Image: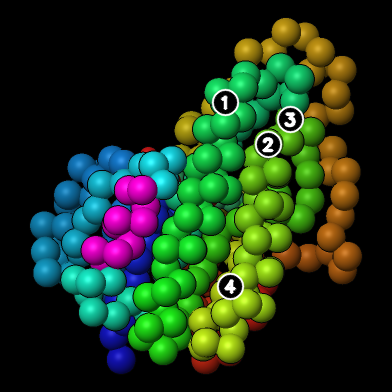
Amino acid sequence: MTKTWFVTGASSGLGRMMTEKLLDRGDRVIGAARRTDALSDLASAHADRLPVVTLDMIDKAAVRAAIDQAFERAGRIDVVVSNAGYGLFGAAEELGDEQIDRQLATNLTGSIQLIRASLPHLRAQGGGRIVQVSSEGGQIAYPGFSLYHASKWGIEGFVEAVAQEVGPFGIDFIIAEPGPTGTNFGAALDRAEPSGIYEKTPAGEVRRLIAGGEFVIRGDAANTVDALIEAADLDHPPFRL
Ligand code: NDP
């Protein structure tokens, strides 16, 4: 049976790859991003099955409006994929206030708003699924990525609580924690200008390891997307992937 998905960050990387795979198998995807022109090739190839929404996750009112309209037009959305995000790199004390605000507004508050806006619609239709793309960086921390980790640990805490609130309404969640994959993530990285103090930090050393070790999602972007879609198709998917 075909499904309808709402995917943020559909213009690039994991979101775009997921959108392509879902369209290829006959599903319908509402694809959201700022650079919707990057989806024009897919949209013209699958005109009726890829409505595209121009959306900046920082704009809370726009996120709510996009979700309200999407549910209204689609009638039903089976899976909402909260995927849009980027990384901020630099020593914590060297990051600019605006850089910090933008990182949290995109990865954390933007995802929170997307999920909050989706809940009444998912309840009204009798249930549904939300996939939150976090990161292995939602469980472990690398020096230089303090605010990225704050955003991903933060969204995981939010999802853990909300999943318990809305489970009785038939709404379930998957938290996906990919390791490094080859997308535009590196090129899109926002970097603080280093003044020199960061050179004293042991870059790349992992400070905290998840109990039990291995992450399920490892490998390239295609494997990651396959694992995500496979889990989202299960009747009872794992809460963490
Ligand atoms: P990409 O940079 O390739 O894609 C990021 C997507 O997020 C783009 O489609 C971009 O669209 C969208 N985006 C960024 N900021 C905003 C915004 N303000 N409003 C709306 N959309 C936005 O990276 P990935 O595909 O790798 O990243 C996808 C997710 O995967 C992120 O949440 C990331 O943290 C996570 N992740 C990635 C890993 C990796 O190694 N690649 C590892 C672990 C997690 P546009 O610019 O058009 O708005």
Q: Are marks 4 and 2 in contact (CB under 8 Å)?
A: no
Does the image show residue 133? yes
Name the residue that disc number 4 marks.
174
User: Which residue bears the numbered disc 2?
Assistant: 147
Local packing at callout 3 (Cα closer than 10 Å; few below 14, some 14-19, many 20+) is: many
Q: Position of residue 53 (x, y in %)?
A: 24, 53
Can you give x and y, in whole percent of width and height, for residue 3 in the image?
31, 81
For the point 37% across and 52% down, which residue is it? 63
- Magenta segment boundaries in residue numbering: 61-70
Q: Which residue position is annotated with label 1? A: 99
- The magenta stretch spans residue 183: no
Q: State left or right for residue 39 relative to residue 212.
A: left
Magenta portion: prevailing SS class: helix
CA distance separating discs 4 and 2: 22 Å
Sequence-earlier tag: 3 or 1: 1
Q: CA distance from mark 1 to mark 2?
A: 9 Å
Q: Which amino acid does the dot numbered 2 rest on?
A: Leu
Question: Callout 3: helix, strand or loop?
Answer: loop
The one of 144 and 122 positioned closer to us in this rendering: 122
At a point 46% along the width and 72% down the height, the residue shown is: 119
Image point (19%, 71%), residue name? 73
Tell whether label 2 touches label 1 (CB within 8 Å).
Answer: yes
Going by the image, does 20 lie left or right of 84? left
